[in-house]
Image (cartoon, rainbow, N blue to C red):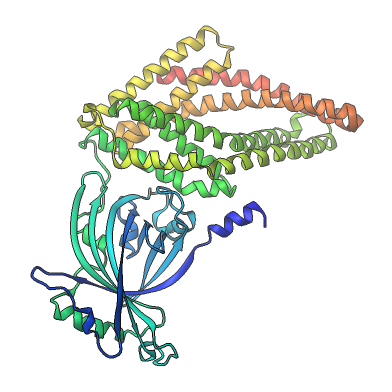
Amino acid sequence: MSIEAQSERVRTPSEQREIERKYDIPEGAGEPELSKLGAGLRAGGASTETLVAEYVDTPELAILGARCVLRRRTGGDDEGWHLKRPRSGDERIEVHAPVGAPRRIPPELRAEFAELIGERPVLPLVELTTIRTTTEVRGGGAWSAGGASDDDDALAALICEDVVRARVLRIGDERTLEWREFEVELAEGASTRVFDEIEAVLFDAGLTPSVHTSKLVRTLDGVEAAQAPTGQATAGEAVVFAIAGRFGEFQAHEDGARRDAPDAVHQARVALRRLRSLLKVFGSLFEADAVKPLAAELKWAGGVLGAPRDAEVLRELVLAELDAEDDLDAGLEAVERARTRIEQVLAERHDAALASFRAEVDSDRWDSLHDRLVSFITAPPFTDDADRRALGAMRRLTRGAIVTVEQRAERARKKPRKLERWHDVRKAAKSVRYGYEAIDELPDAKAKKQRKEWKHLAQAFGELQDAAMLDAELAVIIQDLDADHEREQGDAGAETVAVLEEVRERVRRRRGEGLDTARDALDDVT
């Protein structure tokens, strides 16, 4: 079996039925005397284990709103990711996926809610630590769902006494709760009449049916869906909300990028770039010791995505030039040969870059990136500046980012033919654009116009950068092909090289025009 096939096999979730009831322990209730179970049921010995579960949801509680639960649990014999979906009555369908990394949602489980949550982030909501004492209840064949079994010692149910410590992780709702409860889960194939016999003992001790459908619902009693911050919120709240949104975009496209789905690599890379820009523009709202390492990892991840994306862009640019064949002196046959050769060269480059990307996505370092981002969002390392009013503070910091653009532009104008300096201007301009994008989400009417202006500027410099990259890459491709045709391809190879030389010359002319356009756009906004 191939590595890729093995990977897909591991990621396939399993599904099982779960039928259970929960019971509260009111003040003054006694301990259930499980030795008094009747009708052929008998309690066995007890075992104790510690279970730690982290429940996740969108800030708007969309998953819980769909009457579902998504968690990652460690400890016990069924540790892993669990998605619980309602079915009917006491029955739920539980979908399992391997335990994987702590803060990395299995894509097959996120896909269950793709239409519901879109690009919204899925983040830790509650941490539950449960000390569980489990007692097996066994009985004869009369307790099977069909009413007959040859096994007189068949497992009928599990009775769990849980000591629970719950912690809400969401900003603004942090709190801790502790309680005890009982839970009874039917064994596979057991009749629901088992509940009646066990409940007789539980109710005699003073226990009552739980008023909450789950531990999560009990923990979140009074916690409401998060609302998008306004300009009156604190700057810290507003920026963290924006960071969470960009993280959601990254989560939504990450698996598609791994599968090389159309445009997924591009969208995942853009999400990382937006995250870096938010940290760059609004970094003073957070402790520098937390911002720097996170920004460094985002830069690394963006570079990992950059290789396959650059191959995609290069292919699009070259083929677009060849599609404009009416502007080329070469004949149609020579252009088609050049197209075929370029497709081959760039497909090999893209496949190699994608393989390297997939290896990094499966690495511990990529898992750690998720953990860093989630920790930053759920426990932001705020400075005192984060308490300032959002609109004023974010505008002030974005103006500071504009100063950086102006400084880099001044440096670039001193040696205008050094395109790497204009590339630095472009990167600074994109940070300003994404700064205004975050302000616009507050919302703010002025920011909408400014965001569009800086987007136009970034795009103008982006076209210049594309032309510069295409020029440099064509030079390398031409050199390689030139060597190839001397050895193998003869006149046909020489014609291919000639076509690409002509394309490159056209690109170089347009690159000069693009620089003038970008500089004019820069003058309009600074």
Q: Is 416 situated above or below 325? A: above
Tell which residue pokes out farthest to the top in this image.
414
Tell which residue pokes out farthest to the right in this image.
490
Taking the spot 49% from the left edge, 66% from the top edge, the residue there is 14
The image shows residue 477 at horizontal and vertical percentages of: 74, 28
Taking the spot 38% from the left edge, 48% from the top edge, the residue there is 121
Taking the spot 46% from the left edge, 52% from the top edge, the residue there is 100
The image shows residue 445 at horizontal and vertical percentages of: 30, 35
Residue 73 visible somewhere in the drawing: yes
The image shows residue 308 at horizontal and vertical percentages of: 61, 38
| Relative depth, front residue between 315 and 196 | 196
Based on the displayed image, in which of its 4 quarters is residue 23 positioned?
bottom left
Q: Is 156 situated above or below 123? A: below
Residue 222 visible somewhere in the drawing: no
| Relative depth, front residue between 8 and 186 | 186
| Relative depth, front residue between 225 and 296 | 296
Q: Is the N terminus in the top left, top right, bottom left or bottom right quadrant?
A: bottom right
Q: Is residue 230 left or right of residue 512?
A: left
